[in-house]
Image (tube, grey):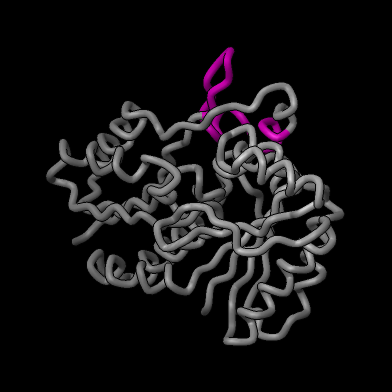
Amino acid sequence: MEKIAILTDSGSDLTLEELRENNVYLAPLNIIYSDGEFEDKIDITPNEVYASLEREIPKTSLPSTAKIEEILNKLEEEGYTHLIAITISSGLSGTANAIRLALEDHPKLKSFVYDTKILSMGEGVLVLNTAQMIKDGKSFDEIVEELPKLRAKTHGYFTINTLEYLKKGGRIGKVAGTIGEILNLKPIITVDEDGIYYTYAKVRGRKQSINRLAKITKGHLETGKFNVWILNGGSSKEEADALFNAVKDFDNIASISTAEIGPALGVHAGPGLLGVVVQEV
C-alpha cells in the first residue's frame, strides 16, 4: 500500500491553511536581512517583507539542509513510502537540487522531485493538483506521469510597479531600467521554458499594465475553460480588485480565486506586484 507525502517550498505561495488542509509539508525559503534570518511564512509574513523593502531589500535563499532533513526523517517515522516534492523553478532557486541531494540519504523513500519551472501560484496549483490526485486514489506512478501534463496547462504573468528593485538586484541593466522609468514602462513578466524570468510585454503606465494582464487572461480563455487566480504582492486592494473585476465576467472561467505573492518574487520585483495564473481544466 502506497502512502504518498507531498513536500513543497514557500515559493508556491499557498497559505498555511491550504497546506494543512491538503496535508502538504513545507520547506520554507529563508529571508535574510543584515540583522537576522527568517523562515518565510513561519517567522515573517509577505506583508511584513513588503513593508520593510524601503528600509532594506533582503536576500532570499533556499530552505536549509537541516529543515529538509528534519522533514524527510519525519516522513519516514510516519510511515510514508513515497514522496512527491514540488519546487520553485530551478532557474530561480537551488531548492529542487537541495531536496534531491537530501533524498540520497533516504533510499527507502521512493521519491520524485518535480521542478515546476515556475513560481507563486503557478507552482501552488500543481501542489493542489497533486493533493487532489492523492485524494482520488491515484498511484505514485500515475501522479508522476500526470504532473508534466498539468504544468503544460499552467501559465503565470506578473506586472511590476517599478523597475527600481530589479535594477538594484542586478536583474535588469541599469540603463534599460532608467530608460524604462523615464518612459513609465511597466513590464509584464513570465518565465521561459527554463523557468527564468523574461519580459513578455512592456506597456506604458499602471492602468495599461492591469488592462494587459486582463487581455492576456482573455486570450487564454478564448481557447478553453480555465481556473484563474488573481495575485497581489504588496499592491493596493483597489488595484487588485480592478484586475479581478476586469477578468471575473469573461467566458470560460471554471473558477476564480485570489492569492498573495510571497517574497520569492516580491523581494526582486518590489511592492506593487500584480499577477494572474491560469490553468486549463
Q: Identify the image quadrant of residue 129.
A: bottom left
Horizontal and vertical percent for residue 270? 69, 39
Q: Residue furthest top?
A: 35
Q: Is residue 86 left or right of residue 234?
A: left
Report the quarter where the N terminus lies: bottom left
Q: Quadrant of residue 268?
A: top right
Q: In the image shown, does 154 or 128 lie closer to the viewer?
A: 154
User: Height in image: 243 above or below 153?
Assistant: above
At 47% from the left and 61% from the top, the residue drawn is 192
**One can see residue 214 in this view:** yes
Expressed as whole percent of the image width and height from the top left, the position of residue 4 reads 29, 56
Magenta span has 160? no
Q: Is residue 45 within the magenta segment?
A: yes
- On the question of residue 24 being in view, the answer is no
Q: Is residue 199 left or right of residue 179?
A: left
Range drawn in magenta: 31-50
Quadrant of the rendered image containing residue 217: bottom right
